[in-house]
């Protein structure tokens, strides 16, 4: 069973959906467990949600610290939980080589738009203000850039009928909550198949 560490900064609705999907009947049941939820913001709403779900939660504050100092502390915490996959879910920090070298191809992120068209914060606002008919939610590996890592999968969501940015966000987040677990499932199943092939060769 793969161990996930989920990193958040805010409301944690994607994190919540992933945790639910690891429970009996969920699409991630038997494939992985959420070992820990870590926030860089002490007041992140998602911390309370994770606690209520019985998941260990830890805050590693980032405010006023250098990226390297913060990430060295993050690495220390992560070592205690031995995650095979680190899932960024609304984690609003760009990671430096301290983290990306330690967990190369093991850190993934979800983004509200096509990362080739828009990077950074506010993807749904960007999609709405640019009059997009669809936004292409993207799950990608993390590298040292801002939403520049290799794309794993994308999902197109119709937003043409949405009347304001709040509606776009609502529709988009509902899609993210399903899509992120699906992508994680595909990654883990692929990994398992590789292990079986290696064991047989
Ligand atoms: C999600 O829309 C996610 O795609 C976005 O933050 C939101 C977090 O929501 N991430 C980015 O914009 C990353 N560049 P949540 O905390 O409710 O899961």
Image: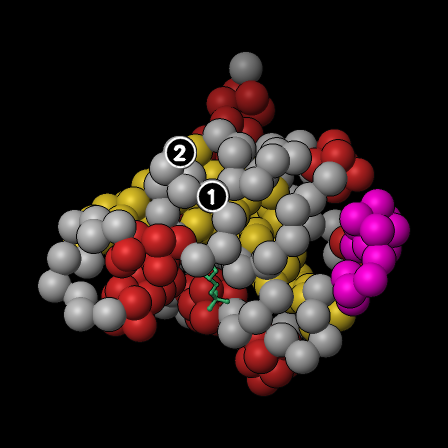
**Label 2 element class:** loop
Q: Quadrant of residue 124?
A: bottom left
Viewer-proximal residue among 192 and 186: 186
Visible residue check, residue 174: no
Whether 30 is drawn above or below 39: the answer is above
Whether 102 is drawn above or below 65: the answer is above
The C terminus appears in which quarter of the rendering?
Answer: top right
Q: Mark 1 sits on what residue?
A: 119
Find out whether residue 64 is within the magenta segment.
yes
Residue 175: give x, y in percent of width and height.
Answer: 29, 60
Q: Is mark 1 within 8 Å of ligand 1?
A: yes
Q: Mark 2 sits on what residue?
A: 116
Which residue lies at the image location 46% right of the left edge and 50% below the top edge?
A: 110
| In this picture, residue 201 sits left or right of residue 136 | right
Find out whether residue 170 is within the magenta segment.
no
Q: Which residues are magenta?
A: 61-74
Visible residue check, residue 20: yes
Residue 114: give x, y in percent of width and height.
Answer: 35, 41
């Amino acid at each position: 069973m793969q161990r996930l560490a989920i990193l958040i900064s805010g409301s944690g609705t994607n994190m919540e959906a992933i945790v639910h999907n690891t429970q009996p009947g969920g699409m991630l049941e038997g494939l992985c467990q959420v070992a820990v939820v870590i926030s860089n913001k002490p007041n992140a709403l998602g911390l309370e949600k994770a606690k209520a779900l019985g998941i260990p939660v830890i805050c590693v504050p980032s405010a006023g610290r250098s990226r390297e100092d913060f990430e060295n502390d993050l690495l220390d915490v992560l070592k205690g939980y031995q995650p095979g996959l680190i899932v960024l879910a609304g984690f609003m920090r760009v990671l430096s080589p301290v983290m990306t070298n330690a967990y190369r191809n093991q850190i993934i992120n979800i983004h509200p738009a096509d990362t080739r068209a828009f990077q950074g914060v506010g993807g749904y606002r960007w999609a709405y203000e640019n009059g997009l008919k669809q936004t292409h939610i993207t799950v990608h590996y993390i590298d040292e850039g801002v939403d520049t890592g290799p794309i794993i999968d994308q999902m197109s969501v119709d937003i043409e009928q949405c009347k304001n940015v709040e509606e776009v966000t609502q529709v988009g987040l509902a899609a993210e909550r399903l899509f992120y677990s699906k992508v994680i499932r595909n990654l883990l199943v692929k990994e398992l198949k590789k292990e079986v092939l290696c064991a047989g060769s």
